[in-house]
Amino acid sequence: MAETYALRVQVESHEYDGEFYLVGEGYGTPADMLDNVAADHLLRIANAPRIEEYLLDVLKHGENTGEAECEATDSDIECWIHVDVSYQRYAFGVGDRMFEFSGAPTKSEIASTVTQLQS
């Protein structure tokens, strides 16, 4: 049976303030989650000209799920992303561990964080 994950994405900006949820299979460690799912969303948010474009893209591709479905999922790993677009603050967290990025995260910063999570 594949490992199940839940990812909560919290976004704050002048235009949008809210959160949405992603549930999927195949990644059962925080490092896997960051490397394969959360990194994609962090980079997409950081590279979006406007946060609305990122949000519409997520909705268009049906990646999100509802809070109730997320909570009802018996996930092996639960992580979160918090993005404050206005102040360019980005963070990834799992349990009581939080990893903040200085400004918009880069692929190398994310890779370094993945390495920290693996140790």
Image (tube, grey):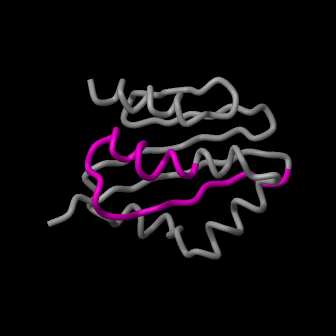
Q: Work out which residue is located at the far left of the displayed protein and give it.
A: 1
| 109 versus 38 height, above or below | above
- Residue 100: give x, y in percent of width and height: 56, 26
Q: Quadrant of the N terminus?
A: bottom left
Seen at 81% across and 52% down, the residue is: 49
Seen at 28% across and 60% down, the residue is: 26
Pick the residue in front: 52 or 16: 52
- Position of residue 31 in the picture relative to residue 59 (left or right): left
Quarter where residue 101 is shown: top right
Instruction: Verify whether residue 25 appears in magenta.
Output: yes
Quarter where residue 50 is shown: bottom right
Seen at 68% across and 31% down, the residue is: 89
- Position of residue 14 in the picture relative to residue 35 (left or right): right
Seen at 51% across and 69% down, the residue is: 66
Q: Which residues are magenta?
A: 15-41
Q: Work out which residue is located at the far front of the displayed protein and give it.
A: 108
Disc tally is 0
- Residue 110: give x, y in percent of width and height: 50, 33
- Position of residue 19 in the picture relative to residue 67 (left or right): right
- Residue 86: give x, y in percent of width and height: 81, 38
Q: Quadrant of the C terminus?
A: top left
| 22 versus 13 height, above or below | below
- Position of residue 69 in the picture relative to residue 47 (left or right): left
Q: Work out which residue is located at the far right of the displayed protein and give it.
A: 14
- Residue 87: give x, y in percent of width and height: 78, 31
Quarter where residue 31 is shown: top left
Instruction: Verify whether residue 72 appears in magenta.
Output: no
